[in-house]
Image (cartoon, rainbow, N blue to C red):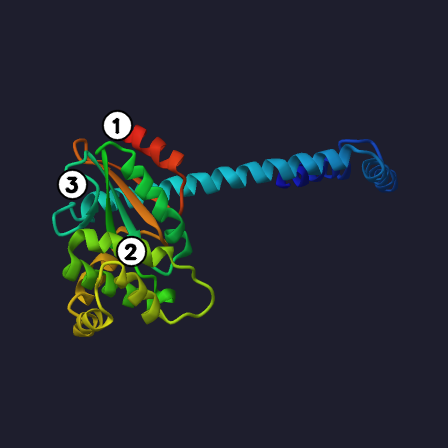
Amino acid sequence: MLNLIIKLSFIFFILNSNAFSMNKEQREILKQEILNDLLHSNTLKELVSTEIKLYEINKISLKSKQKQQLQSAISQKAQKILRPVSTDDHIYGSPTAPISIIEFSDFECPYCRKIHPVLKRLVNESKDQVNWVFRHYPLSFHKPNAQLEAEASECIAHLAQNEGFWTFIDALFAQPRRGKQNRDQLINRAAAKVNISPQSLDKCIKTEKFKKRVNMDEKEALAIGLRGTPANILIHHLSKKIKIRQGSASLQTFNKDIKELLK
């Protein structure tokens, strides 16, 4: 649009200068004729349309560049800050897999619920080439429910080990969420899948012994600069290459990311 304004301004600048042997009245008449011609022809519409398309292209290009810069900055921070995968983590799949997907997740996040079966299928079909590491990122606007569910999952891991943890979060994510629901009921129904009684789980949660663990994961996500959930960091352990994938994504997208890491 700016280009169009410049072009029209230039035309009128020339008309207002002494470059033409015209008096003021003649120049005004000519300017009016040019304007009338533009307004009653497709020329102006075409110029405006072209300028709008150029503006949209430039806007998309700028947005893409900014996104790439942000992803690059997050990757650099992750290289420095991200905790190495260890036996302290909740790992689904082979612990020795060459690639790990570290997911920072929120049990109240609908996109985390959507991506959960995708990541599970990805690992199941990877033939021990990919494992899935679950870390907590309860978003501020999902608290206190997301915090409570995260601490409950840590209690389940303590009471029913790693396998129980994954069974519990599968069940927690699988439950339909419609409107305001009693989170204690959701948590207890999921705990029943691993034979943990409401009393045992409630006793563990009330100690707040795993609050520090949840907060540690959250602080890590914030320090890296991850925005929203799910936030997935794919790591090729041998090459140390990292790929950031924020938001929900398809199985095909993750497979493409993995192929890029293996190049």
Q: Amino acid at mark 1?
A: Leu
- Residue 262 against residue 32 in the figure, above or below: above
Compared across the picture, whether 208 is left or right of 72 comes to left
Is the Cβ of the residue at disc 1 closer than 8 Å to that at disc 2?
A: no
Mark 3 nearby-residue class (10 Å; few <14, some 14–19, many ≥20) = many
The amino acid on which the numbered mark 3 sits, given as a three-letter code, is: Pro
Mark 2 secondary-structure assignment: helix
The tag on residue 95 is 3
Q: Earlier in the sequence, mark 1 or mark 3?
A: 3
Q: Kindly identify which residue carries mark 1.
A: 262
Q: Is residue 22 above or below residue 142?
A: above
Residue 79 place in picture, x, y as percent: 21, 42
Mark 1, residues whose alpha carbon is within 10 Å: few (<14), some, or many (≥20)?
Answer: few
Q: Is residue 226 above or below residue 52?
A: below
Q: Tell me: 207 left or right of 34.
A: left
Percent x, y of residue 215: 22, 63
For residue 10, which quarter of the picture?
Answer: top right
**Element under disc 1:** loop
Disc 1 vs disc 3: which is toward the camera? 3
Q: Can I make out residue 159 in this image?
A: yes
x 20%, y 74%: residue: 206
Residue 106 seen in the figure = no
> Which amino acid lies under the numbered mark 2 shown in the image of this protein?
Ile
Which residue has dot 2 on it?
169
For the residues marked 1 and 2, what is the alpha-carbon distance in whole angstroms? 30 Å
